[in-house]
Amino acid sequence: MRFPRPRARPRSLAGQLFAMQVVLVAAVVAGCAFFAYVSGSGQAEETASRQARAAALAVADSPSVREAIRAPDPSAVLQPYAEQVRKDTGIAFVTIMDPHRVRWTHPDADRIGETFLGHTAQALRGETFSETYTGTLGPSIRVVTPIRDGGRIVGLVSAGITVERVSTQVRAQLRALGLAAGAALALGGIGTYVVNARLRRHTHGMNAAELSRLHDYHEATLHAVREGLLMLDGQRRIALINDAGRELLGLAPGTVGRRVTELELPAPLTGALLASEERVDEVHLTADRVIVVNTRPVVGGERRGTVVTLRDHTELQALSGELDSERGFTQALRSQAHEAANRLHTVVSLIELDRAEEAVGFATAELELAQALTDRVVGAVAEPVLAALLLGKAAQANERGVELVLADDSLIDDGSLPATLPQRDLVTILGNLIDNAVDAASEAVTGTPGAAAADGPLPAQRTHSPTRPARARVTVTALAGDGELLLRVADNGAGVEPADAAEVFRRGWSTHGAGRGLGLALVRQAAHRNGGAVALAHGPDGGAEFTVRLPLTGAAGKGRTP
């Protein structure tokens, strides 16, 4: 009975790579040797041709040669001269001849007077040329050039080196090249063995199929995770990052291997990633997103690193802001309903006291005041979302004893804002700026601790106003014109110290305790997301003045110029 033979396990990846690398190293060394041989042969021939050309031109330009040619027996003078040149230059021959190719010199004196073997037509036309030709000394690389005397060709010079001598030089180079190739092959084999031994240890002897499956599972896991995943090595370089992590941090592909300090992230976020201690549910802002960061150090192994998870909090933060606005509107409506009930009771009581004229006057004055604000906002701001926001914020401010004023030069015509400008961002920008201004103005009038701007400096830092204003006021300017939207909010509070102007936009800078200080950071983020900018200056009423400018891409501003 025969049992089936166990299926052989494929060779490990390290073993396969070792065999392939040995073959590759051998092929590379052989190819380099062949190339060096071909290149060396060509260089040897080129060197021989240049050497022969230099010797031939030197002889042809020698005055003593021209003088000897005019003598009755040129060979008597030219033969010793040519032999001396040949020995000095190390070439095979220097042959001087008359225009009819009859030799005056030759390394073999018995050949003097015979006809030169080779081509001379080009030289007789005044040209210097080179060729490989078989003469009395065998195949040679030779150069032929004319000898001129007064513009007339009186002779020719041929200098050359035998092909055998060139081949001897190439063979000597080939032996040295063979030794170098052998040494390179040996060193390459040893290095390949060492590298593959290390690879075998790191891959735990797994073969290519096993590693491929492991990689597929790894990639599938990374892409399946919806949260951002970031792994840093001991040098705080990115060892791994998934697609969600790149998107949340706004990084381009190819960031693996870069240090965290090279990513140009906001300083607080960079500090959280570089921290050695654990971070739990920290909220950070990038240029376009609000993210929740968790970090955990990795201890053990060869190096210490950090695992970072990132959660997108942008939509939730925006929804929270909208919910806060809706709550504010609800509270304002509740307060208005309460006030309306009180006023209605007052009117009814006046009527019951037979003071009808006073009742009509009281009711008419209240209606005119409310209608005037509504007409002013609706007439100047044709954007429904902004108009509703201003009316709601005006009601909220009035409940806190703050007068919300719409500047006279405010104007946003219907259709002046493009559809590409998100209404949610407009609510974020204008709503947060008004809330901060109302807080600052209210605190300046009442002097109540803790009523300062949610994202502003401490009360002790607001020292611009020496006396408290009699009436808290916030002035809002909303103007679309010349291709940009201008939103400006100014208050008559205590203002902002110049040294703190840059800090007010930093996340977490607040006087209302932990978990606050996000409003102005969100304002700057929303402005940046839409290609705009936000600036802080000293307002005309002594308080702070925030100005946001947003480009109206694709829309022609119809309002007046700011």
Image (cartoon, rainbow, N blue to C red):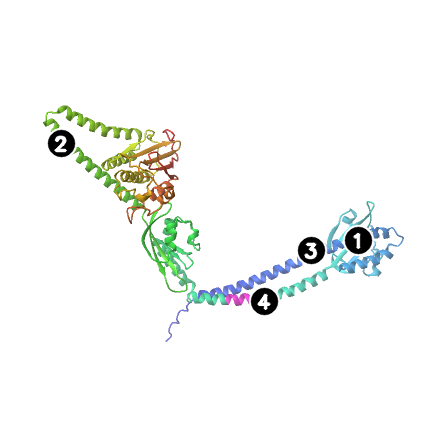
Which residue lies under the disc numbered 4? Answer: 183
Q: Secondary structure at mark 4?
A: helix
Which residue lies under the disc numbered 3? Answer: 46
The residue type indicated by label 2 comes to His
Q: Position of residue 196 (x, y in %)?
A: 48, 66
3D distance between C-alphas at marks 4 and 3: 29 Å
Which residue lies under the disc numbered 1? Answer: 59
Visible in this render: residue 363? Answer: yes
The residue type indicated by label 1 comes to Val
The residues colored magenta run: 183-193
Left or right, residue 55 beside residue 292: right
The residue type indicated by label 3 comes to Glu
3D distance between C-alphas at marks 1 and 4: 45 Å
Which residue lies under the disc numbered 2? Answer: 345
Whether tag 2 and tag 4 are in contact, CB under 8 A, the answer is no
Left or right, residue 422 beside residue 354: right
